[in-house]
Image (tube, helix red, strand yellow):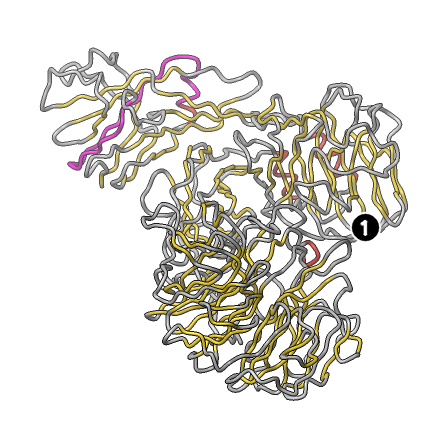
């Protein structure tokens, strides 16, 4: 019997540091090996492996007993040692995974011997083994044997005779309960379930005859009842499919479950804890039940049911968490991942359905391609080990067959690197966004945001992520200066302190004025806003505050220009065959929403622009709330209410030009707008109610009017947004108009020349140096020249900022104020020395009020009018100080300068 060992409580709290606003997706707890209540890491430990299938596991005194259908054991992949015989049984050290001294061979005269069940007596002194075999180390037995744990010898006084395979065992102090394929035990009729004396194997009066094989048997913690699972439809002649509760003494039926489990599903395993019992279920064909059920011991009624698809083979409650072995591939019915990749090891609370952040994985493996089949917890020297057996051949992507284990300590796996970006839509605000990382044993991770290369984070944000749910997290920096450029990097840390490498640098220039189009989309309530400005796959950032990021599928064409909206934003291109973007977040939409996007195409094969579907990377089975194009270029907006309800434009829009489409539904019905003008309405206020994901660029259109040749979009999209409200006609018109309004443009200008002067070497030129220096006494000054562009037509200079980067030398920063002054005298990079240094003017154009040590980029705003007067020509600046603390910077010649020194110029409408 398996029992819980107590409650591990999860104390969770949100951690924020620095200035700004954080949008996380969960709460974080105190540092631990893994995120509570998970008790084991996902890091597989080196373990000896079998050459066949492992069906059974049991533990006693630091030994883990292994039963199955195999003939040898071999060392872990890459480890030393030689293969050794092991005939359907092995005893391994719980802490090392290596074989011990106990060696037993389970054999049979005819057919293939196998060990299908192992269980320890309550005092852990006797190991009972069931399966199909006729001898153990040559001692005759009949599919059930008792082994003395201390001596590793068969107990010859225990001699029941089972006429067929024993698949499941449970034991109390005086009784062994068995389930399997047998019809008689020691010549007495006992069909599929039986009980024998734990000492000599004498058949007990217990009778619970079933019409089909038994696969699971457990005794309730109070010893009063036995829980039966299997393929059966009757027990004791009473209708009860796959599950039954019977009296532990007589076998009389206590609780039947007619119609409780689908007729094409069976129970493969049952496990108990102090409050309930749990079933592992496998089905065949359509409409099956493949998941897990939790039932209370009081009354034996259902607590919850997890309807994930993917044949569950084993369940194990431990410290209020239910670990399971399956090949779950579709958990959409419980609001989790849709049909797709198989996941073989999962964890969830014993109180609810939702999955926890523990998901090491195996492959399907050999034999029936099921993957893992059995789990057990073993302990040694105060460390608990979760052992897993089955028919897999890899664990976490590495070669390992049939056996693996995970410890309660020693988490060494760091989270994946966050994918970060940054954007600024309004003065004084930069939004830093990142796709949350993946960690297989931590559902809550802590993210640190670093600005400008600093070694000290400016913000700390906690967010939740799971292997099937990795939404965007974001933090808003409210300490930025308009026109200045900033860089950000992000790390992820798990509960054990393992930290990912820094993300790639995300660069942004703080807006000098409001960016009209995206600001309007955000202000009007968008909760998904994909602008498609990414330069690499697979992450599509959400520029709203809804953090509904997307994922590229099939490698769409990125950064297509020109985009639909004036400014630097780009578009995305789809090939009409297999490319799209799907949402990261599973959700329900309801009957009030707006869909908006810009599109450009010359296709004559049509396709879906935007829509809502039940799957992500696979074709959706449910799909509506979508806009698609017919082969002749007309737009269709449709919802499903039991029948397709659509609005279709009269005009075609496949003319190769950018167009704007908005589709709304609410209490007033449906409306479709194109290029700011309403094209049709329909008095329909409902749609198909299901949970799913937003798609851009393609998804199923089967059954819809004027279905195009292609369900996928061949063309470009830009500025895709979804709102939980109905956009008014005025808002739609405003968005269409704002798209063509002049937008700010940002130009970065690297220094054309730079050098410094040193009073200590008055005749020396430093034009080729990789460094620049500034100090008042003894004197150092640095000189910079920039070739400034003219203002683009119709714009003026809105802001200017100087960016410099401190070097990596110790003490490169300064406590003194460094002024930026105009250079009035002539100078050259190759000719300037202290002796002939140029004259400086005033007043100061800007200043750095001290710069900390550590190599990082620092920026300061410059006098806009002064810089504007120099546009279109060369402009000289000097860095000067009156203090005694030297500042050391990288020059433009430095290999690590990252484009510094540089001027960032923002141009916009007057």
Q: Where residue 471 sits: x, y (%)?
A: 56, 48
Taking the view exactly as shown, the residue that stands out farthest to the left is: 760
How many residues crowd around disc 1 within 10 Å: few (fewer than 14), some, or many (20 or more)? some
Residue where numbered disc 1 is placed: 688
Residue at 45 percent across and 32 percent down: it is 483
Camera-nearest residue between 603 and 459: 603
Camera-nearest residue between 581 and 449: 581
Q: In the rendered view, would you say 370 is above or below 728?
A: below
Q: Where residue 340 sits: x, y (%)?
A: 65, 46
Q: In the rendered view, would you say 91 is above or below 454?
A: below
Q: Specify whether 728 is left or right of 106.
A: right
Q: Specify whether 625 is left or right of 439.
A: right
Q: Please say whether residue 605 is visible from this viewpoint.
A: yes
Camera-nearest residue between 27 and 893: 27
Q: In the rendered view, would you say 682 is above or below 736?
A: below
Residue at 35 percent across and 27 percent down: it is 898
Q: Is residue 58 magenta?
A: no
Q: In the rendered view, would you say 874 is above or below 55?
A: above
Magenta segment boundaries in residue numbering: 867-891
Q: Specify whether 16 is left or right of 573.
A: left
Q: Quadrant of residue 265?
A: bottom right
Q: Where residue 355 sits: x, y (%)?
A: 58, 60
> The C terminus is located in which quarter?
top right
Residue at 77 percent across and 38 percent down: it is 700
Q: Quadrant of residue 672?
A: top right
Q: Specify whether 254 is left or right of 644.
A: left
Q: Quadrant of residue 878?
A: top left
Q: Where residue 309 sits: x, y (%)?
A: 68, 55
């Amino acid at each position: 019997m398996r029992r819980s060992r107590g409650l591990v409580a999860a104390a969770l709290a949100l951690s924020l540091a620095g200035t700004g606003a954080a949008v996380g997706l969960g709460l974080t707890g105190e540092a631990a090996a893994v995120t509570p209540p998970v008790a084991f890491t996902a890091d597989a430990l080196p373990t000896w492996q079998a050459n066949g299938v492992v069906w059974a596991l049991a533990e006693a005194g630091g030994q883990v007993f292994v039963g199955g259908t195999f003939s040898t054991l071999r060392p872990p992949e890459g480890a030393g040692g030689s293969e050794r015989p092991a005939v359907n049984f092995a005893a391994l050290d719980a802490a090392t995974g290596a074989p011990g001294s106990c060696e037993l061979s389970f054999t049979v005269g005819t057919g293939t011997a196998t060990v299908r069940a192992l269980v320890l007596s309550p005092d852990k002194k006797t190991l009972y083994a069931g399966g199909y075999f006729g001898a153990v180390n040559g001692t005759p037995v009949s599919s059930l044997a008792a082994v003395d744990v201390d001596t590793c010898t068969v107990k010859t006084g225990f001699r029941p005779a089972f006429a067929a395979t024993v698949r499941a065992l449970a034991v109390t102090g005086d009784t062994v309960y068995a389930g399997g394929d047998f019809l008689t035990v020691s010549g007495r009729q006992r069909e599929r379930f039986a009980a024998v004396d734990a000492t000599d194997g004498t058949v007990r009066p217990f009778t619970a005859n079933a019409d089909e094989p038994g696969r699971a048997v457990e005794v309730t913690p109070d010893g009063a009842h036995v829980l039966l699972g299997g393929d059966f439809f009757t027990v004791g002649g009473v209708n009860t499919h796959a599950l039954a509760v019977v009296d532990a003494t007589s076998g009389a039926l206590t609780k039947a479950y007619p119609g409780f489990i689908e007729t094409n599903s069976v129970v493969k395993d049952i496990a108990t804890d102090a409050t309930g019992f749990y079933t592992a279920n496998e089905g065949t064909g359509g409409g099956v039940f493949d998941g897990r059920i939790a039932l209370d011991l009081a009354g034996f009624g259902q607590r919850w049911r997890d309807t994930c698809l993917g044949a569950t083979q084993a369940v194990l409650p431990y410290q209020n968490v239910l670990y399971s072995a399956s090949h779950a591939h579709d958990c959409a019915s419980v609001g989790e991942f849709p049909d797709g990749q198989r996941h073989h090891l999962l964890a969830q609370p014993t109180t609810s359905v939702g999955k926890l952040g523990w998901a090491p994985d195996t492959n399907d493996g050999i034999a029936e391609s099921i993957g893992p089949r059995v789990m057990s917890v073993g302990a040694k020297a105060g460390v608990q080990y979760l052992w897993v057996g089955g028919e897999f051949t890899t664990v976490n992507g590495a070669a390992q067959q049939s056996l693996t284990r995970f410890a309660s300590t020693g988490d060494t796996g760091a989270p994946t690197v966050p994918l970060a970006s940054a954007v600024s839509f309004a003065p004084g605000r930069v939004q830093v966004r990142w796709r949350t990382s993946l960690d297989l044993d931590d559902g809550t991770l802590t993210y640190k945001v670093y600005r400008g290369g600093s070694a000290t984070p400016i913000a700390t944000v906690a967010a939740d992520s799971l292997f099937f749910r990795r939404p965007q997290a974001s933090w808003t920096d409210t300490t930025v200066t308009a026109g200045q450029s900033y860089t950000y990097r992000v790390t992820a840390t798990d509960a054990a302190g393992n930290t990912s490498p820094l993300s790639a640098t995300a660069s942004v220039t703080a807006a000098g004025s409001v960016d009209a189009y995206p600001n309007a989309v955000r202000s009007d309530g968008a909760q998904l806003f994909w602008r498609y400005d990414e330069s690499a796959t697979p992450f599509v950032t959400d520029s709203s505050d809804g953090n509904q990021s997307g994922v590229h599928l099939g490698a769409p064409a990125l950064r297509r220009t020109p985009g639909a909206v004036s400014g630097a934003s780009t578009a995305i291109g789809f090939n009409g065959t297999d490319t799209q973007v799907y949402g990261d977040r599973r959700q329900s939409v309801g009957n009030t929403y707006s869909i908006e996007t810009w599109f450009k195409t010359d296709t004559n094969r049509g396709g879906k622009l935007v829509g809502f579907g039940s799957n992500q990377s696979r074709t959706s089975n449910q799909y509506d709330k979508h806009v698609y194009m017919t082969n002749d270029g007309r737009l269709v907006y449709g919802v499903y209410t039991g029948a397709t309800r659509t609005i279709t434009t009269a005009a075609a829009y496949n003319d190769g030009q950018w167009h704007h489409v908005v589709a709304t539904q609410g209490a007033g019905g449906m409306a479709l707008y194109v290029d700011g003008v309403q094209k049709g309405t329909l008095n329909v206020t409902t749609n198909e109610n299901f949970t799913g994901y937003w798609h851009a660029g393609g998804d199923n259109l089967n059954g819809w009017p004027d279905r195009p040749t292609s369900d996928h979009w061949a063309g470009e999209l830009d500025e895709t947004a979804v709102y939980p409200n109905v956009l008014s006609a005025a808002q739609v018109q405003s968005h269409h108009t704002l798209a063509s309004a002049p937008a700010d443009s940002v130009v970065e200008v690297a220094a054309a020349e730079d050098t410094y002067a040193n009073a200590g070497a008055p005749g020396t030129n430093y034009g080729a140096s990789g460094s620049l220096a500034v100090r008042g006494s003894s004197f150092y000054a640095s000189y910079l020249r920039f070739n400034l562009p003219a203002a683009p037509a119709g714009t003026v200079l809105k802001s200017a900022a100087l960016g410099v980067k401190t070097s990596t030398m110790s003490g490169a920063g300064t406590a003194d104020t460094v002024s930026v002054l105009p250079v009035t005298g002539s100078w050259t990079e190759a000719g300037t020395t202290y002796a002939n240094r140029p004259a400086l003017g005033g007043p100061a154009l800007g200043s750095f009020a001290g710069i900390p040590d550590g190599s990082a980029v620092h920026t300061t705003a410059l006098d806009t009018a002064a810089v504007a007067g120099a546009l279109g020509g060369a402009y000289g600046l000097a860095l000067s100080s009156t203090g005694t603390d030297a500042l050391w910077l990288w020059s433009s010649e430095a290999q690590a300068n990252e484009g510094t020194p540089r001027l960032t110029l923002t141009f916009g409408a007057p």
